[in-house]
Image: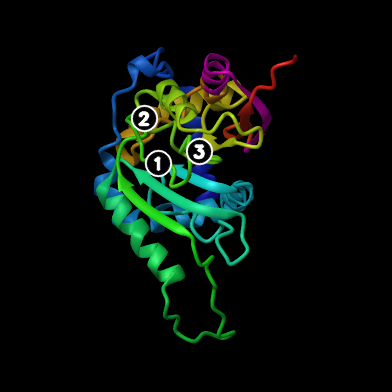
Amino acid sequence: AGAIAYYLGELFVAASKTCDNPHIAEISEQKDVAARYDETADSFDSEVGMSEWLIGINKNRAQLAAGCHGHVLEVSCGTGRNLGYYDVSAGGRVDSLTLLDLSAPMIDVCKKKWEALYSDYKKPGWFNSRVVLKPDLKIRFATISALEEMPLAPTDYPKKYDTIIQTMGLCSTDKPKELLENLVRHLDTSNPDARILLLEHGRSYREWLNKVLDNSAQKHAELHGCWFNRDIGAIVEEAAEKTGLEVSRQRRKHLGTTWLFELKPKVVAE
């Protein structure tokens, strides 16, 4: 009870005070803090694990990953918090999985997590279970920015991806719109079933909560490497309109601060 009272008190203080920078929600006013992830890679899972489980983010990750099919690209993969949710078993829907992140320490943690989940040798557990991977599954890791030219899909021409997924990535780049536009360039838009799947956090539909986010955004960004007060909906809609995609599905949770999107190639009427 004491912890809850303290948390509510912090919210009240944040909502009551005036933000020092009235433009703090504008991307141009937000400095690049992505390098913070190099410092937090080893402790990242322990820092966010409990909170993500409590508010259902793990479930959201599982739902999003279940929609991935064909040749899959995950950008801003971080420590690999979506690993374990992809359908990579024998007969599964995923043919290849390419995981990218700007942070080399994050990629190192991600690789180790993959090996722990899907290594050839599994120590006996209560159920002595073992995941049988798809025999020809291709798995790749790379340290690279999602703003740059990314690895081609390991398939035939046009060597583009059937599914591109990103979770909690638009908050940690200083060019979120450009990042989304680059994802579209790597998506096989000739495939009507191609999808971009996003799980993000940003502004609420409650102004009092937006005030809390704005007042604590600077400190949060410096500590965790992400700006959680961005208008994610506007960013995604603008990028979709510019690239010829459409938002086929959008959901919001946690007073609108958690955003889930599905984008697909726009159908052109003949």
- The disc, 2 or 1, on the residue closer to the chain's N-terminal end is 1
Q: What residue span does the magenta drawing correspond to?
A: 236-254
Identify residue for label 2: 173
Which one is in front, 83 or 208?
83
User: Can you tell which mark lies on residue 202?
Assistant: none
Work out how far the residue at label 2 is from the one at label 1, CA to CA, in angstroms: 10 Å
- The disc, 3 or 1, on the residue closer to the chain's N-terminal end is 3
Q: Which quadrant: the C terminus?
A: top right
Rendered residue at 41%/21% (across/down): 178
**Residue 20 percent coordinates (x, y):** 35, 17
Q: Is residue 197 visible?
A: yes
User: Which amino acid, mark 2?
Assistant: Thr
Q: Give neighbour class at mark 3: few <14, some 14-19, many 20+ (Cα, 10 Å).
A: few
Name the residue at the right extreme: 270
Q: Is residue 92 above or below residue 64?
A: below
Query: Magenta stretch: residue 251 in it?
Result: yes
Name the residue at the front extreme: 157
Circle 3 SS class:
helix
The reply to whether the C-beta atoms of the residues labelled 2 and 3 are less than 8 Å apart is no
Rendered residue at 67%/34% (across/down): 251
Which one is in front, 52 or 109?
109
Mark 2 or 3: in front is 2
Residue 104 is left or right of residue 170, and the answer is left
Rendered residue at 65%/22% (across/down): 266
Q: Is residue 2 visible?
A: no
Q: Give neighbour class at mark 1: few <14, some 14-19, many 20+ (Cα, 10 Å).
A: many
Identify residue for label 1: 76
**Residue 21 percent coordinates (x, y):** 36, 15
Quadrant of residue 144 within the rendered picture: top left
